[in-house]
Amino acid sequence: MKRRRRMELILAGAMLTLSACQATPTEDVIVQKAEQQEMLTQAAETSPDMEGKNLKERYQIPDSISFDVSSEDGMRVYKAENAPVIVPDIEEAAVASANRCDYIDEDTKLWTEVFFGDREVWKTEEEVLTKSDYLEIIANREASFEATKKDIEAGLGDGLTMEECLKDHEESMEFLTKRMEAAPEEAPEPGHQTPDYVLTPGRQSDSFDITGDMDGETAVLVIDQGEWYTNAYYRLDTEEITLGADHWYNDGLELPNVCIYSEEEAVRMAKETLEKLQPGNNLELRKCIPRYDPSDEDYDNMLWQPESYCGYTLFFSREVNGLMENDTFSGKVTEDPENDVNVPFGYEEVEVDIDNKGIVFLWWENRMQAGEIQQENVQLLPFEKIQAIIEEQITMQDAAREIDWKIEDNVTSVELGTLCILTPNEKDVYTMVPVWEVYGTESNGNQVGSEIVLTINAINGSIINRKNRY
């Protein structure tokens, strides 16, 4: 199973030849960008009767909000029916600095020691597929083609026609057959060359790529970075794979987790590893999704569900004085041609997957370095102003994009967190500011889970374009 999965990935590659601030109509929160930046470091004035009160009490933040607003053309409708307003139980918000944190040659040895210890490691070599490998792939593709034909005949083709299916299959078979005819009978013996422990310059990025022995199984470690990104990941190549149970978890399916590690132990294991990789980081657990064993999955039964979970997918984010950076995987991108600029550096993402084998996958994208607290107890806008901004601005998202269908979104929650935005006139220097994130789902779509539909600077009320990060 492991080898077939890797062969499929290789062939897939071979066959494929925020943020800009937008002014809000509310006059008393429209300020120039320079003035907005100054507001980020204004300390809050706390009256004596509010001493010791949390943010919810100090700013009179309600438990939930309700509204029903539409755009002028009626094509965008947003409704909130007692949508919960989520605020951490903290007394004050803060602003902090952050910097892009590139990898250096010393990181290659550090990461190797953290994951492999004194085990044998070697430069990763390109896998060579043999004739028998291709024959196995061809047989699997044939079986998949037959199953897809049955789905189309049963009206389950999801828009795919039989003609399109046949054409795709013929092209795939032609490609695979040519590859099979040119493939060797036997794969060459691996060289197992000793790593150089440097980031090797490439045409578009610098990289480090090794494979190691993990008690009879192999694992890979890759560090790759370019001008606009950094990626680093560790992956255990194991026959006994587990997958994130996002679908069942989001549907509220509560099952026992039979992993030998408790969730608390898994989080501790992940945090200890992250601390070794970047000492002194301020990463905290944002979300935990259970994992399941797919080996017994019945793909013909759409109602199939696992009998138990067997691990954890952990997502970590930066935290500033108790305010956590919210999910940056999701989020509608505001179409704003006038302020559309290239993002110098993407959002940071940290994922750790753990099952009975321990850490089987760690992904760290666009690594940052936490800076100093620039202002503790920063002044936030009253929530009544925030709600007014939400109702005025939420229908204007994607307003520049012409649509010929009606968008109806249900606001599922409004959450106070922090977001790493660009610092004006500074290269690779960022500011982590408190923000209000509005989450929603399309009532007339096939979306699973909520996504961010609006991001508001909690200090000055400006709208943050998550694409541009300012």
Image (spheres, grey):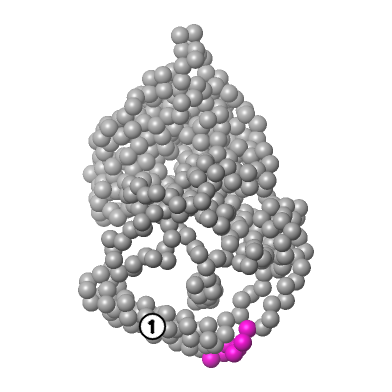
Is 183 part of what is drawn in magenta?
Answer: yes
> Which residue is disc 1 drawn over?
142
In x, y percent, where is residue 76?
27, 45
Magenta-drawn segment: 181-187
Q: Is residue 149 above or below residue 118?
A: below
Front-lying residue, 80 or 34: 80
Taking the spot 46% from the left edge, 26% from the top edge, the residue there is 89
In x, y percent, where is residue 399?
35, 46
- Can residue 320 be seen here? The reply is yes
Task: Considering the whole magenta stretch, tell me its main secondary structure.
Answer: loop
Left or right: 442 with respect to 360? left
Taking the spot 26% from the left edge, 42% from the top edge, the residue there is 77
Taking the spot 30% from the left edge, 73% from the top edge, the residue there is 160
How many numbered marks are there? Answer: 1
Taking the spot 66% from the left edge, 73% from the top edge, the residue there is 125
Is 232 part of what is drawn in magenta?
Answer: no
Front-lying residue, 130 or 172: 130
Q: Is residue 22 above or below residue 210?
A: above
Front-lying residue, 437 or 237: 237
Helix, strand or loop under label 1: helix
Left or right: 207 with respect to 292? right
Left or right: 107 with respect to 365? right
- Can residue 421 be seen here? The reply is no
Q: Is residue 9 above or below residue 70?
A: below
In x, y percent, where is residue 178?
51, 88
Mark 1 burial class by Cα count in 10 Å: few <14, some 14-19, many 20+: some
Q: Which residue type carries mark 1?
A: Glu
Determine the image quadrant of residue 272: top right
In x, y percent, where is residue 225?
64, 57
